[in-house]
Amino acid sequence: MEHSSLSLQELNSLVRKSIRTCLPDTYWVQAELSDVRANYSGHCYLEFVQKDAKSNALIAKARGIIWSNVYYQLKAYFERETGQAFVSGIKVLVKVSVDFHELYGYSLTVTDIDPTYTLGDMALRRKEILKRLDEEGVLTLNKELELPELTQRIAVISSATAAGYGDFCNQLENNAFGFAFHSRLFPAVMQGEAVESSIISALERINAECDRWDVVVIIRGGGATSDLSGFDTYELATHCAQFPLPVITGIGHERDDTVLDMVSHTRVKTPTAAAEFLINHLRQTAERLERYTQFIYQELPVLFTRKKEQFEHWVSRIPVRVQMRLQHEHFRQERLTRQIQMGWQARFLKEEHRLQIDRRIATALEVILQREKHRLALIEQQVKASSPELLLKKGYSITLKNGRAVTDATQLLPGDEVVTKVAKGEFKSKVI
């Protein structure tokens, strides 16, 4: 049995024609860049990938190409607008045409790019990092530190070959005020993929001798504007935010701040501006010291003179004040003396009156006592006159029954024994 057949080239050619027929236009596609490579001829070969939002697993992939005449302009435009290098790992919105080649297969040819989409993704990533730092309570820690009044010991994180580092040092050394600064370079990579780890390592070296420095300056200068992605990472931001010294950043980015700029103590545009900031801070300190010196030499003598005059005025008033006080006290003493004398006189008269009353009471008591003595004498005479012994001597007798005087003969019964007392003795008898 014979079958009609196609060669592989014929089949692929049919696929190419079908794709061109079905997808003749260009399309805006959202994707993430992967494996970005530019060859010697200036063409850029890359892959577009899409990952699952939850598992981060690949769910779509396509080979892409940007021809050299488009790539040169597109790359410069993208990096100028975003401040982000055209490298693997970023999300882009690109305009593509769909192609199929018999030998190389399916691919997407890039004809344009929209930087605002990448800017939005970068802004979202920055926002997420800042939100995480805020939730952890470290977002503004470095901003809350105070710059020392004399900020002269400066730890610099930069590349030794960076033009910005040289500008920074020259600006400090040749400042118009003659201020002395001591700076030391802690070398770090300031562009490319090693930015994060390199700067963190430099911060750790500075922290090991933290008490020797007043401030940390992170400067860049001279690098491509597209090499700023390394300053937009969580790890670098959290190290900077929690660093015990104020951190000043001047990484040469004119537009939106990087995450590192947002968490640092002070953000300036360039390394030269960082030097000017430090010089100006020291100048303000010097001006304050000059004002204090001027106050000491000019204002203090005037103040001392004024206080001396005031003191002398008070001293001159002391005799008058003392005399007035003495006179006041003299009058008060005299008033108190008169009050005491009047009080004693009144008390003396009161006591004298009380003594007179006491004497009258004593006289009255004496009269009463004599009268009572006379009355008692009369009663005594009456008692003596009524005494049984006296009556017995007069011839009377007392008859007793059971020790009691018999005053009623009807109380006696025949046979009762009674005792009769006379003046001299007593005798018994029986009632018949």
Image: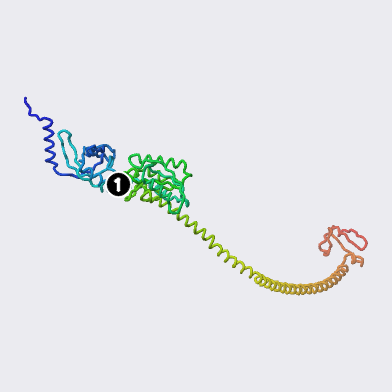
- Please tell me whether residue 299 is drawn above or below residue 90 in the rendered image: below
The residue nearer to you, when weighing 160 against 312, is 160
| Residue 423 coordinates in the image, percent (x, y) | 92, 63
Would you name the residue on which mark 1 appears? 83
For the question of whether residue 160 can be seen, the reply is: yes
Left or right of 78: which side holds 384?
Answer: right
For the question of whether residue 131 can be seen, the reply is: no
Callout 1: SS? loop
The residue nearer to you, when weighing 378 against 218, is 218
| Residue 96 coordinates in the image, percent (x, y) | 19, 43
The 10 Å Cα crowd at callout 1, few under 14, some 14 to 19, many 20 or more, is many
| Residue 35 coordinates in the image, percent (x, y) | 26, 37
Left or right of 258: which side holds 17?
Answer: left
Hey, what amino acid is under mark 1?
A: Gly
The residue nearer to you, when weighing 328 against 89, is 89
Q: Write the residue at 62% across / 68% down.
A: 312
- Please tell me whether residue 87 is drawn above or below residue 269 in the rendered image: above
Q: Residue furthest left?
A: 1
Q: Write the residue at 9% across / 29% down.
A: 5
Left or right of 369: which side holds 307?
Answer: left
The residue nearer to you, when weighing 226 against 34, is 226
Q: Which quadrant does the N terminus fall into? A: top left
- Colour scheme: rainbow
Q: Write the residue at 40% across / 39% down.
A: 201
Left or right of 157: which side holds 74?
Answer: left
Residue 92 sits in quarter: top left
